[in-house]
Image (cartoon, rainbow, N blue to C red):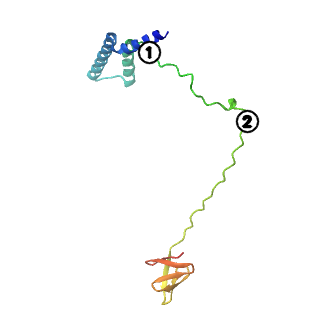
Amino acid sequence: MLPALIGAGALAEELPRSPACHTALQALEEAEDGIAATAAASAVVASDLQRQRAVAARLQPLRKRVADACLGGLTTSPPPSQRTWVVPTQSQQSGTARAPLPATPQVTVPLPRFEPPVTVTHCTAAACFTSDGSTLTRVGPTLVGPRGTCAVQGNFVRCP
């Protein structure tokens, strides 16, 4: 049996180089060139779908002849492997039931709170008063609020 398989392998390698394969390929190329030339010459075409079907019907026997001569008639793919892995369905699994996963707690992220900008309304020699009603103490060129040093940018104040 093994010599028959080796002979078939050698035959399969020789088929594309055979004169019958070259003749079939040449006939197919000539038919395709003829169809292309007639399509370019004709200005009125019924519809693309009808034209495609007509071309396919005309080329099908020539393609079959090429497949037989060059591929030895192997125009279909081999059957799928018998060792293909298949995911078992729920009914094929063992009878042990898994414990349900605990429900994940829903995380609620609070929306950022909008804080209107605070501006300095007026200042004295010792303190500045802001638009939100707080009093900031002057320590040299900086302003100090109830929770620490404030950042001043122009007329706006940001205190921690």
**Residue visible at 73% across and 37% down in the picture:** 97
Residue 29 found in image quarter: top left
Q: Residue furthest front?
A: 3
Residue type at mark 2: give it.
Answer: Thr
- Give the residue type that dot 1 points to: Leu
Q: Please state the horizontal and vertical placement of residue 9, each as a whole percent of the image.
A: 42, 14
Q: Nearer the viewer, residue 5 or 138?
A: 5
Q: Which circle, 2 or 1, is nearer the viewer? A: 2
User: Can residue 62 be seen at all in this image of the molecule?
Assistant: no
- Residue drawn 37% across and 18% down? 54
- The residue nearer to you, when weighing 25 against 50, is 25
Residue 39 in the image: state x and y as whole percent.
Answer: 30, 21
Looking at the image, how many numbered discs can be counted on the residues?
Answer: 2
- Disc assigned to residue 90: none
Residue 115 position, x and y percent, is 54, 71
Q: Secondary structure under badge 2?
A: loop
- Say which residue appears at 65% left-offset and 54% top-offset: 106
Closer to the camera, 67 or 78?
78
Q: Identify which residue, 21 or 126, lies in the foreground.
A: 21
Q: Can residue 151 be seen here?
A: yes
- Using the image, determine if residue 114 lies above or below residue 16: below
Tell me the number on the disc at residue 74.
1
What label does residue 96 carry, if any? 2
